[in-house]
Structure formats: structure tokens, C-alpha cells
Image: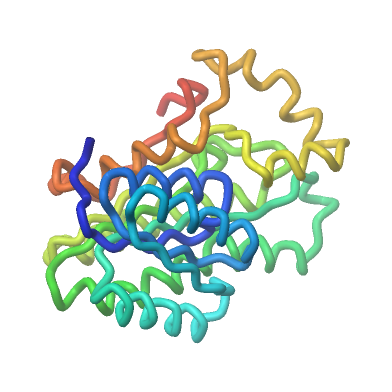
Amino acid sequence: MFELKDKVAIVTGGARGIGKGICLVLAKQGANIAIADLLEKEARETLGEIEKLGRKALFLKTDITVKAQVEETVKKVVDTFGGVDILVNCAGWDKMMPFTQSTPEFWEKVIGINFRGALNFTHVVLGYMIPKNYGKIINIGSDAGRVGSMGESVYSACKGAIMAFTKTIARETARYKITVNCICPGPTPTPLMEEMKAEGGFAAKVFQGMENIIPMRRMGGPEDIAYAVAFFVSDEANFITGQTLSVSGGLTMC
């Protein structure tokens, strides 16, 4: 157990998948949770699960690629809970295809959700964390950004950028007792993965038999990622910043 009693956490993409797992684990540790997402139905279900754990929860429908919406969301969180202690930039999206078959419109969507959204939230939240000399920021990267991933060229590029961004912001904010770290999941069964597999073709081939090449012989679950987040945002990790941690069952070791 990591003590997070009454800490306030914003989790982007918290409605489902890895983001939902993070919300529930942080709530179990005592945090109050604000979900920033566009998926209202799934977010409401996750709110109910958080509240059953005895924690306060808030859903704010937010397009993370629009800075003005992010500013409004963070202000509502601060007005509701009195501040923000933790930011988890988890929202992500992709479709698998060879780079030569992708389009500039597709690139912009992938970059907007997987990189620009983290820039927007980090920029706004730091305006609240710096004055109080405290904060924990976790960026959810991907092992695709560390070693590459077939059919995910732009996504991989965004996740590589997230890792570099994490290190730089960690250096800039360490003097304010703010830590910034990156967690890179390996392949994780989520609704997004299932949607990609259902389309067949490229994605179905990539994910087929994935468990057989992971040393621990299984894919990770959202909770595997979530407990790594819980550690990084706890006071036990106060002297850890600018780091990238793979949570992949040994698929990548670097």
C-alpha cells in the first residue's frame, strides 16, 4: 500500500482500459479522482466504481487536444477539490497500419491525442503545482517508443517524444519538489487493442501469439501498470524523477 489519502489526481483517458485501472488503484490508495475523457458512458461507470471505494470522483468531458478545454477542466478540478496533486497523462489512441498507407490527417490525430494532449495538461497543471512546491506527474509512454513497433510509426514517435518531454520537465521542475516520470506499458489487453484486432489485417497479425514472446508468458493488465503509477506518485518515490520504467513482463529490457 502507498498512502495517497485525500490526494487529488487527474487521469486523462481514465474512462476505460489502462486509465480506468489507474483510477481504481489510486482510489484504493486513498486518492480522489478526476477523469478527463470524451467517453461519457464508460467514464460514468468508472466513477461509480471509484465512489464504491469510498472516494470522491469527478468526470469532466474534455478534448485534451484543445488547450482551452484543458484549462477549464483543471480549473473545475481545483475549484471542486481545492487543488491538484497528481497528473497522469494516460489518454492515447492509434490504428495499426504501415506508414506508407497512413495520411497527414491520421498523423495529426495521433500526434494530437498522444503528445499534444500531454503538453496541454502538463502546461496547465504546472501552473497550480509550482506555487505550492509539490506535484507528481506521470506520463504513460509505450515500449513502442523505446524499441519501435510495426504498424505504429507515428504513435511510436509520439511515445518517444513523451519520454524526452518527461526528462526535460523533470529537470525544469525538480527545484519545486515536483517529480515527473514515464511508465511504458508493453502490449496490454484494452478496449482499444480489441478494436484494432477486430479490424483484422495488420493488427490481428501483430497481436497473434504475442504472449509467446513475452518472457512472463502473458500480457500485462491495466492493474500492472496502475501499481507502478501508484509507486511513482507516492512519497516513497520523492527522490525519483526523470525516469522511464517499462512494465512489459520482460518483453523489452533496456
Q: Is residue 168 at least partly visible in the picture?
A: no
In the figure, is residue 125 to the left or right of 211? left
* Rendered view: 63 above or below 193: below
Q: Residue at x 43, y 82 (%)?
A: 71
| Observer able to see residue 143 | yes
Tell me the quadrant of the picture where the N terminus can be found. Answer: top left
Residue 70 relative to residue 132: left or right: right
| Residue in the foreground of this view, choosing between 154 and 60 | 60
- Name which quarter of the figure residue 180 lies in: bottom left
Badge count: 0
- Report the residue at 49% width, 55% height from top: 48
Give the quarter of the image for residue 32: bottom left
Q: Report the colour scheme.
A: rainbow
Q: Which residue is more in the foreground, 206 or 5?
A: 5
Residue 246 x, y percent position in the rendering: 42, 34
Is residue 77 shown left or right of residue 220? left
The residue that appears at 48% across and 58% down in the rendered structure is 47
Residue 174: image x %, image y %? Answer: 16, 60
The quarter of the rendered structure image containing the C terminus is top left
Q: Residue 252's spot in the image, x, y percent?
A: 48, 26
Vertical placement of residue 122 versus 228, above or below: below
Q: Position of residue 50 (x, y in %)?
A: 42, 52
Q: Against 63, is 2 above or below?
A: above
What residue sits 53% from the left and 69% below the top?
116
